[in-house]
Amino acid sequence: MPNGYNDRPDGCADTGTSARPDSDQIDRRLVVTPRRAWRMLDCGATHGYELLAAGELDSYLDGRARRITVASIEKFITRKLATPRSGETRGDLVEPAVRARKRTREQAR
C-alpha cells in the first residue's frame, strides 16, 4: 500500500538504481576485500596472503576487516607482465599457432 512518501510498498525511496552495482561501479572501487582480490587475481587464499606477507599488495585493517587496494593489485599485475619468466622472452608468449604461420611464410619465401 502506498505510504504517500513514494510508490514502493516497502517504504524505500526509489533512486532509480538497482541494489547491485553494475560493473563500472565495481571497477572504480579503491579497495576490495581479500576474497574479491583473490578472485581478481585468480588465486587462492594461501597464495593471496603470501602476496600480502611479501609486501606485493598493500592492505590495511578497517576495524577487523582487511581491505586491499585495487591500485596495488593493478601494480602487481603490471610488474608480473613486465618481468619475463626465467629463460623466457616476450616472444615466447606468442601463441604457437602464430609462430607456426610465421615459419610457414618464411619457408615459402
Image: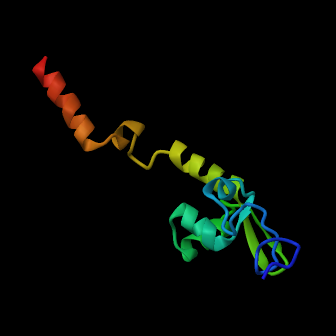
Q: Residue furthest left?
A: 108
> Eyeballing the image, is 98 above or below 105?
below
Number of callouts: 0
Quadrant in which the N terminus appears: bottom right
Q: Position of residue 23 (x, y in %)?
A: 61, 57
For this rendering, which residue is in front, 89 or 39?
A: 39
Which residue is at a point 55% across and 67% down the rendered structure image? 39
Which residue is at a point 53% across and 42% down the rendered structure image? 82
> Eyeballing the image, is 21 above or below 109?
below
* Residue 100 placement: quadrant: top left
> Eyeballing the image, is 35 above or below 76?
below
Q: Residue furthest right?
A: 5
Which residue is at a point 17% across and 24% down the rendered structure image? 105
Quadrant in which the C terminus appears: top left
Q: How is the image coloured?
A: rainbow
Which residue is at a point 11% across and 21% down the rendered structure image? 108
